[in-house]
Image (cartoon, helix red, strand yellow):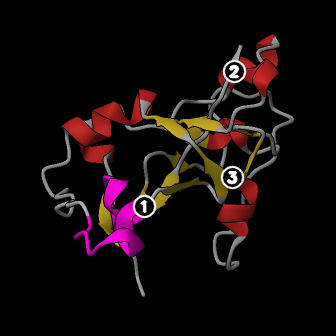
């Protein structure tokens, strides 16, 4: 249903269902920015992010402390719209999932990701298009299943 409506949503889930014909299933969320009421996941604005397979990382990351959120102060009619928003500021979360050099569930024809030192290469390889990563590297995204693999980061956005 969501795919037919073309609603912008994302999911921190592996993209292995793509080969089975589930081209409408969201997958591949690795990073997000929340600036006020605008949510951007893998460089695509969305209205909803389901954490799915990244929940293990949240549960096993003792170093994560999300910043305190508070509604903006109301100062009359000028800020009435802002006062209705429940969040302000900007926060980013990285490493919901991680990109591997190779794909553990793909065929032998899957490319090897080798552009680690190229600025923006990971972002380009994992950019969302219509709520999923559709590049040849979609199967390279994995989500932590062991505590020692958790790399989740959350912080206030850099200025």
Q: Residue furthest right?
A: 109
Q: Nearer the viewer, mark 2 or mark 3?
A: 2
**Residue 24 appears in the figure:** no
Foreground: 136 or 2? 2
For the residues labelled 1 and 2, the Cα–Cα distance comes to 28 Å
Which residue corresponds to mark 2?
2
Foreground: 62 or 51? 51
For the residues labelled 2 and 3, the Cα–Cα distance comes to 21 Å
Foreground: 81 or 54? 81
Q: Is residue 48 left or right of residue 94?
A: right
Q: Nearer the viewer, mark 1 or mark 2?
A: 1
Magenta-drawn stretch contains 60:
no
Q: Is residue 78 above or below residue 53?
A: below
Which residue corresponds to mark 1?
81
Between disc 3 and disc 1, whose residue precedes? 1
The boundaries of the magenta stretch are 72-89
Which residue corresponds to mark 3?
126
Q: Is residue 65 left or right of residue 31?
A: left
Local packing at callout 3 (Cα closer than 10 Å; few below 14, some 14-19, many 20+) is many
């Amino acid at each position: 249903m969501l795919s037919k409506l073309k609603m912008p949503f994302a999911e921190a889930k592996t993209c292995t269902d793509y080969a089975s014909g589930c081209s409408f299933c969201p997958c591949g969320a690795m990073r997000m920015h929340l600036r006020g009421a605008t949510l951007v996941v893998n460089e695509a604005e969305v209205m909803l992010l389901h954490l799915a397979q990244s929940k293990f990382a949240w549960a096993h990351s003792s170093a994560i402390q999300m910043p305190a959120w508070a509604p903006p102060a109301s100062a009359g009619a000028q800020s009435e719209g802002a006062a209705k928003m429940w969040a302000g500021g900007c926060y980013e979360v990285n490493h919901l999932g991680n990109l591997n050099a190779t794909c553990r569930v793909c065929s032998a024809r899957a490319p090897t990701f080798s552009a680690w030192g190229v600025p923006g290469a990971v972002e380009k390889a994992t950019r969302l298009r219509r709520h999923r990563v559709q590049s040849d590297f979609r199967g390279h995204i994995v989500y932590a299943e062991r505590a020692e693999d958790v790399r989740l980061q959350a912080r206030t956005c850099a200025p």
